[in-house]
Image (cartoon, helix red, strand yellow):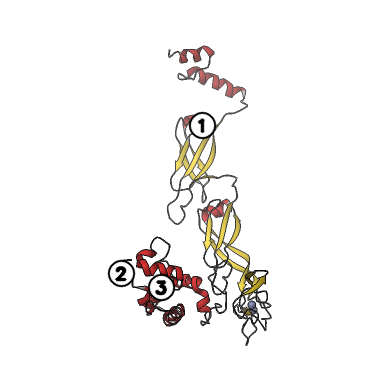
């Protein structure tokens, strides 16, 4: 921040201004440049944030003394400075001050600061094929929602919440206990600074109701176990005008009888006969769509993996796909007929490269003979 303006200049007060003068100058500026009154005006928003930053320092005796001695340099490295990124940041820092004179959202009143709503999690089980190809599901989410009858105010139509008489809207009351005076949340308004005098019938004054919300959710092809889909703003409502939380749909994928998954590749095991392995063959293999023909080369060994390009699972958010890996398993017959046995013995006699079959052959091989 090379050319930061002087905080006193920002608020338009003298260096000797009293705490009350500073507070009132800040209120004036906040009113003038408040984003609700200056929609789509980035200049006003900058001024609004600049004023909030100045007030954060000058409104605090300790920070103000530091600033008076060292200027902006004294504020660096202490977490002060350029951190009001949005007007929400400003509300959450100085909600009380605005609460006194803004009617926006539900932020009027002592302690009513906007807070984001809770995130929700929904565990969704999908079949292997739905996860592979993508699908659309209807979810029924039990959640809290802002009451539509009172827009969350909790008050019946034609009424509004009144400042709590017990705490005079502060949300806190001071109690004496022996020598001590301690502040506790007001028991009448439960710290909110306001009381609903005519509760809304639908939500009984709570401002929120329990609903079952139906949602159509598109599950993209290629999701895996543990994939999380984030649905922005589908969580619980925020407090006092804060934003909704998000809904996370966590995916569980069922196993498939035929396919297993390795990254974005699909794996299947194809049984072939010894003759097919030796002489080669064309076999039909299943895919996620129609079966395809696969050429088994001559002399294929058991355990060999043949790759069919692009027949695997889609990469999330891409048109690229993994491969289909076909693991060849050579079936050895457990029973043969007399005729087959004769032919195999005949075959064995003619087989030049027959593998080692006697104990002494193993030793020969081991000696490098
Ligand atoms: Zn209501
Ligand atoms: Zn109260």
Camera-near label (1 vs 2) is: 2
Query: Residue 230: x percent and y percent?
Result: 52, 61
Camera-near label (3 vs 1) is: 3
Name the residue beneath numbered marker 3: 54
Name the residue beneath numbered marker 2: 3
The residue at the point 52 percent across, 50 percent down is 288
Circles 3, 2 touching at the beta carbon (< 8 Å) = no
Query: SS for tag 2?
Result: loop
- Residue 189 visible in this rendered orientation of the protein: yes
Q: How crowded is mark 2: few (under 14 residues within 10 Å), some or many (20 or more)?
A: few
Foreground residue among 236 and 93? 93
Query: Residue 25: x percent and y percent?
Result: 42, 81
| Mark closest to the chain's N terminus, 1 or 2 | 2
- Residue 42 visible in this rendered orientation of the protein: no
Q: Quadrant of residue 247?
A: bottom right
How far is mark 3 from mark 2, CA to CA? 14 Å
Query: SS for tag 1?
Result: loop
């Amino acid at each position: 921040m090379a050319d930061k303006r002087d905080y006193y200049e920002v608020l338009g007060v003298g260096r000797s201004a009293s705490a009350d003068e500073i507070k009132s100058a800040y209120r004036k500026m906040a009113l003038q440049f408040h984003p609700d009154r200056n929609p789509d005006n980035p200049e006003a928003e900058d001024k609004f944030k600049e004023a909030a930053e100045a007030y954060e320092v000058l409104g605090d005796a300790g920070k103000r003394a530091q600033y008076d001695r060292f200027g902006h340099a004294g504020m660096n490295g202490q977490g002060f400075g350029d951190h009001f990124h949005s007007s929400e940041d400003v509300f959450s820092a100085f909600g009380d001050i605005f609460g006194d004179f803004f009617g926006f959202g539900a932020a009027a009143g002592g302690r009513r600061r906007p807070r984001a709503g809770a995130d929700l999690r929904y565990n969704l089980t999908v079949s292997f094929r739905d996860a592979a190809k993508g699908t659309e599901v209807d979810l029924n989410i039990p959640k809290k929602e802002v009451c539509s009858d009172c827009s969350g105010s909790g008050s019946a139509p034609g009424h509004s919440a009144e400042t709590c008489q017990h705490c005079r809207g502060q949300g806190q009351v001071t109690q004496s206990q022996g020598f001590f005076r301690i502040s506790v949340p007001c028991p009448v308004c439960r710290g909110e600074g306001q009381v609903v005098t005519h509760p809304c019938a639908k939500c009984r004054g709570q401002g929120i109701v329990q609903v079952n919300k139906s949602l159509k959710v598109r599950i993209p092809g290629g999701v895996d176990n543990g994939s999380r889909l984030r649905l922005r703003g589908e969580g619980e409502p925020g407090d006092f005008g804060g934003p909704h939380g998000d809904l996370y749909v966590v995916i569980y994928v069922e196993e498939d009888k035929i396919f297993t998954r390795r990254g974005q590749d699909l794996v299947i095991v194809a049984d072939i006969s010894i003759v097919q392995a030796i002489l080669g063959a064309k076999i039909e293999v299943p895919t996620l769509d129609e079966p395809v023909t696969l050429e088994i080369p001559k002399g294929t060994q058991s355990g060999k993996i043949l790759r069919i390009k692009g027949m695997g699972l889609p990469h999330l958010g891409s048109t690229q796909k993994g491969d289909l890996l076909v693991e060849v398993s050579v079936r050895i017959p457990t029973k043969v007929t007399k005729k087959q046995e004769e032919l195999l013995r005949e075959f064995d006699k003619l087989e030049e490269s027959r593998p080692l079959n006697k104990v002494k052959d193993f030793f020969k091989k081991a000696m490098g003979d």
